[in-house]
Amino acid sequence: MVKEILKLGNPQLYEVSEPISKDEAEDVKIWVRDLHDTLMAYREEYGAGRAVALPQIGVKKRLLYMYDKKPYVFIDPELSFPDEERYVLMDDCMSFPGLTVKVERYRRAVIKYLDEDFLPREMELEGDYSELLQHEYDHLDGILATMRAIDNKSFYMQQMKRDF
């Protein structure tokens, strides 16, 4: 079911999410379906969107969903960084469509997580995927890209594509 995406300024976006327990497995299936439907609706409306965090639809649990040719579910993810190499990029967010923020992110990351069957997984990330999952992971800790802006002049408005 398509859910409303919380927008910049909503105090719920700044809260830290709780871990997911195995007895919430049925909830996870519902949450993943809701995240998928919400992401696809956002893509249809704005022509963008690759991933979404469960807190963005108001559920304070540590779950990320990414869709890139197939779905990826990250339950209770943990991020680490194999080196210190970083880069600067323009970051956007479904919680503030049309606004981009200049931020600095690690070029590479490793994400350890449980998949939708609660099996442990690990993925090495680089470039776009590293940045994307750092961004989504931040949502689990109540951090938005606006809070990672390089300085107070790092905000840009853009026209979002809308098909009416």
Image (spheres, rainbow, N blue to C red):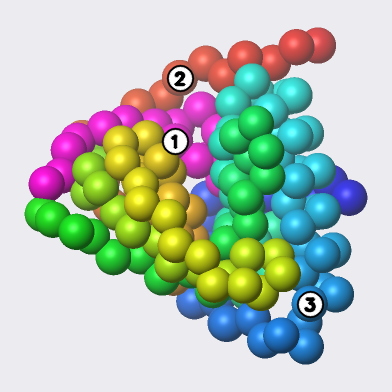
10 Å crowding of disc 1: few (<14), some (14-19), many (20+): many
Q: Is residue 13 above or below residue 20?
A: above
**Image mark for residue 92:** 1
Q: Position of residue 83 (x, y in %)?
A: 13, 56
Q: Amino acid at mark 3?
A: Ala
Can you tell which mark lies on residue 158? 2
Earlier-in-chain disc, 3 versus 2? 3
Mark 3: give few (<14), some (14-19) or many (20+) Cα within 10 Å: some
Q: Mark 3 = which residue?
A: 25
Residue depicted at 28% across the width and 65% down the height: 80
Q: Is residue 90 magenta?
A: yes
Q: Residue at x 76, y 57 (%)?
A: 32
Going from N to C along the chain, the mark reached first, 2 or 1, is 1
Which stretch did the figure color magenta? 85-101
Q: Note whether 114 is above or below 81 in the view shown.
A: below
Which residue shows up at 57% across the image and 19% down it? 160
Q: What is the quadrant of residue 50 in the picture?
A: top right
Going 63% across and 57% down the picture, which residue do you hit? 73
Q: Is residue 32 above or below residue 131?
A: below
Report the amino acid beneath label 1.
Asp
Quick one: which residue is furthest to the left in this view? 84
- Residue 144 visible in the shown view: no
Question: Callout 2: helix, strand or loop?
Answer: loop
- Residue 118: x %, y % from top left: 66, 74
Residue 55 on the magenta segment: no
Q: Identity of the amino acid at label 2?
A: Gln
Q: Are marks 2 and 1 in contact (CB under 8 Å)?
A: yes
Q: In what element is the residue under mark 1?
A: loop
